Image (tube, coloured by chain):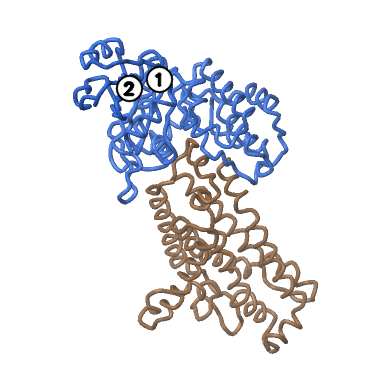
Chain colours: A brown, B blue
Amino acid sequence: MMLCYKAWRESRTRFLVSALTLAGFCCAFVLYHHDARTGIGDQSASYAGYIWHITYKSYLRDLFVLLALLLGAGGLLRERSYRTSAFTLALPQTRWRLVSVRAAVGMAELGMLSLLPALVIVSLSPLIHESYPLMQALKFSVLWTICGTFIFMIGFLSSVIFDGEYTASLVGFFALLLYSAVVDLPAVERYVGDIHDIMSGAGMPYFRQDAFVLAGPLPWSTLANILLVSLVMAAFAGVITRRQDF
Amino acid sequence: MSYPFVIETQQLTKAYGKVQAVNALNLRVAANQITCFLGRNGAGKSTTIKMLLGMTHPTSGTGTVLGRTIQDAQQSRDLRRHVAYVAEDKQLYAYMTVEEMVRFTRSFYADWRPEVEQRLLKQYELSPRRRVKALSKGMRTKLALLLALSRRPELLILDEPSEGLDPVAIEELLQTLVAAAAEGTTIFFSSHQIAEVERIADHVCMINHGRLVMDLPLDRLRQDYRRITLSFAAEPPPTAEVQAEGIEQVRTNGRQITMMASRDADAVVERLQRLRPISVEVEPVGLREAFLEKVKEEA
């Protein structure tokens, strides 16, 4: 339990800043929707369409992706630069446990971040005499949690390989760019879905473009595969950590 | 559980590329003693300790601590339940307070002694609400010692414990270690500070360039080690005529030959009389001198 507490304390600032940033943007997008719609040249779409465009498809989603990467930072390599890794490694815990607890806490934080847009948008929309369906928002939260886990794991894996305060996050960012470029290749896109599109539903069979809503069941098999790949990355991070010298 | 040695390594080696940080180390540390792991900076002390605690993987060789194999992850975790460790720079989680640090550490050990924790908090004048990052190095060392000694560890390993401490803090530290040893904790500490080693150690293991170059009780060093200086009227005989078992570091300087006898100095002197020196001086050897001689010899 105290390892969870340690992982939470180490990521707390990043998590709270991320939460405040996401919540702040959601508030702004809802409360200043007129200005925002003018700004992005989106006057014709419905409120649901506007929310989807600005939140789930573009700005907020991209911000969430970056924050998920940042949440993956930390760990024993970072501790080594702060010279606390000797204390941590002297605890009667295996490295597997240290890695898995950090991964679990990060995923829990990510889940909470994914819920934020749903809570803020649904609760603030009545203030501007609009409404956004809670179920829709929660479905997007599920997509964001699972796809965010994949992105978090890129940052997480990077943090067990690369030393330095910002190196791991930067490498994770470039790895994500590379992934995005590769999955956009015609030869690849037929077989591998783009995580960003899965998050927003754009062009996906479970999304109705005319009404900007998620229709029907979520793509559970795709999500399960994403989760599986994420867990494999976490296990790989464990294997790497187990072999490292501190 | 009883073990002949709390720490035992066989040919323990750690190489970083072509550099052998620890080279075929055969180390044995007996229970219920204060053993000093003496060596220069970069001699391989910290690397050895890190291998013993599973922080660094040996390139080759094996080792056990409290009867558990250091290369086995589960056994390594198990041995760390019984070993307390104070790292060289004593860095703890800067974002926690003293109280949080104690609570965090306590949760991992079933043998935690709250009464010792409270006593040491008072004795070391550690304010529970103070943040770790606001502590001086001396206070951080005290907190690290508190975290180690509030348990009932079978073995306490300290890496350069006095590094960066003022003389008063060093004195308190040495007294703490002696008190812990009196309570039955085996202490293994690395140092390059001869004075503190001579103050508290029962046994010295000296390491140089990753190799064990001396392993003996400090009392034996004091009793048996002698520097012998032979002066000759003319050119001294070749050093080969002086060499024998128990004689180390033979050097010729003008008309003098100096050497260090590691045992039975009287018999050595008697034997050397046949070389017809004009004078023979026999002096006791301190740890500082033995250390410097060993380091010079290896260089």
Q: Are marks 2 and 1 on the same chain?
A: yes
Q: Amino acid at mark 1?
A: Val
Per the rendering, the mark at residue B223 is none
x 55%, y 32%: residue:
B162
Q: Position of residue B107 (x, y in %)?
A: 57, 33
Q: Nearer the viewer, residue B256 or A66?
A: B256
- Contact between marks 2 and 1 (CB within 8 A): the answer is yes
On the rendered structure, is B95 left or right of A99? right
x and y, in percent, of residue B50 in the image: 42, 38
Locate the N terminus of chain B and report the quarter of the image it occupies.
Answer: top left
Give the percent coordinates (x, y) of residue A199.
54, 71
- For badge 2, the amino acid type reads Met
In which quarter of the view is residue B9 placed?
top left
SS at circle 1: loop
* Residue closer to the observer: A19 or B269: B269
Cα distance, mark 2 to mark 1? 8 Å
Q: Is residue A46 above or below residue A30?
A: below
Which residue is label 1 attached to?
A: B285
Kindly identify the residue that appears in the image at 57 percent across and 48 percent down: A7
Quadrant including the C terminus of chain B: top left
Res A140 → quadrant? bottom right
- Marked residue chain, label 1: B
Classify mark 1: residues with Cα within 10 Å, few (<14), some (14-19) or many (20+). many
From the viewer's side, name the closer residue of A109 and A174.
A174
The residue under label 2 is B260
At mark 2, the secondary structure is strand
Q: Is residue A236 above or below residue A56?
A: above
